Structure formats: structure tokens, C-alpha cells
Amino acid sequence: MLDTLPLAETLPAPIRMRTELAREIRRDPVAHMIVENSLIHRINASAVAFDDKVTRVYLGPEWDRYVQILADNDALEGILRTAEPAIACISPLTLALILGDARRLPYDPTPFARYTSNQIVNASTGRGPVTIVASWPPRHGKTTLISRRSAEWLLINYPNKSAAILGYNDAFASDHGKTARNDVG
């Protein structure tokens, strides 16, 4: 329930504004899905994310409002324009997409990744359980999304908090911890 905690007064103004904007977008599941799905579409040239089971489950009764906004070009552009300064801070998935695109290593999220990222967002906003267990098939992005990007996402939103990366051995955790530190830096 990090999004309910007050931000540290010592945070620089740009970080505070970006974090507050990301919180606002995360509070509205429809805006969150519009930004995330538009980013997936732009980076991976995939329109599948706009109408898939993950989006429908995450939105539930908000699905009709989502469809209405997608059909209204002005409303859609307004949400995307508003979210632009904080797009990487919205979810671990948006961070993975932005960093992958910047490094020319596109992150093509599986439904597992999208669902898990949504659960992490739900935990941070208080809409879901705070403990998440992910068991995915090999080579589906667990390490990228959970071991790297989720810790980085936490640190860029809450630089005054700590994040731990745990793994099956110390080399794994150390390597991913260094990568996260360097990415956030």
C-alpha cells in the first residue's frame, strides 16, 4: 500500500511530481490500462493488448468506460498526454517496456507478465494482496519483470524506501541488484 504513504518532504520536486502523477494514473485502472496497452502497441506493434483477457479481468466492471475512451480520440490523447512525464513510473511493465525500447531490446510482455505487473500495482495501491507468488514457464520474462524491473520501479517511485532482490544464489541476486542500481542511477 505504498501509494497511500506520504511522500518524503526531502524528495526533489521533479521526482515528487512524477510520483504523484503516476499514483494518480494507478488509482484509475482504466487510465492505467490505456497507458500500458498504448505503450505495448507503440513499442511492439501489437493491438492484441487492447482487448485481451488480462485487460478484461483487471478492469472488471470498468470495461465499458475503457471501451468508450478508446473510441473517443480526444479523451484517449488527453490521457496519454497527461501520463507522458510519468509513463515509466506507472507500473513495472511500463518501466520494462521503456527501458527495453531505449536499449533496442524490446520487452514483449506475455499475459503472465502483464497480469503479474497488474498485481504488483494492485498491491502498491491497496487494491490487492501484498504478497504475490509468480510461477511462470521458463523464458517468459520472470527475471526481467520481477527481479529487475519491479525493484527498479519501486526505487524510482519511492527513492527513500529500500528494495531487496532475492534469488537462488548470491551471484544471481548480486548481479540483478547491480543492474537495478545502475538502471535507477
Image: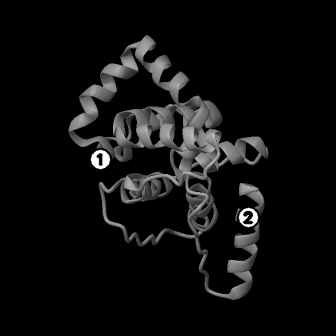
Depth check: 8 or 164 in front? 8
Mark 2, other Cα within 10 Å: few <14 / some 14–19 / many ≥20: some
Q: Residue drawn at (75%, 74%), measured in percent from left and top? A: 175
Residues 104 and 65: in front is 65
Q: Give the answer, above or below, for where 162 lies relative to 70.
A: below
Please tell me which residue is depicted at 62% across the width and 40% down the height of the picture.
13
In the rendered image, residue 19, in percent from the top left (x then y), is placed at 53, 44
Q: Quadrant of residue 66?
A: top left
Q: Is residue 156 left or right of residue 172?
A: left
Q: Is residue 23 left or right of residue 28?
A: right
- Quadrant including the C terminus: bottom right
Location of the N terminus by quadrant is bottom left
Name the element at disc 1.
helix
Residue annotated with mark 1: 57
**Residue 114 at what x, y percent from top left?**
47, 51
Dot 1 or dot 2, earlier in sequence: 1
Q: Is residue 17 above or below residue 10?
A: above
Q: Residues within 10 Å of mark 1 (few under 14, many from 20)?
A: few
In the image, what residue type sits under mark 2? Arg
Q: Is 150 on the left-hand or right-hand side of 107?
A: left
Quadrant position of residue 34: top left
Residue lying furthest left in this view? Answer: 61
Q: Return the x and y of residue 115 as percentages of the image width and height.
A: 42, 54
User: For this rendering, which residue is in front, 94 or 85?
Assistant: 85
Residue type at numbered disc 1 = Val
Q: Residue at x 44, y 13 (%)?
A: 73
Label 1 or label 2, whichever lies nearer to me, is: 2
For the point 41% across and 16% down, the residue is 75
Q: Secondary structure at mark 2?
A: helix
Q: Mark 2 — residue?
A: 181
Q: How is the image coloured?
A: one colour
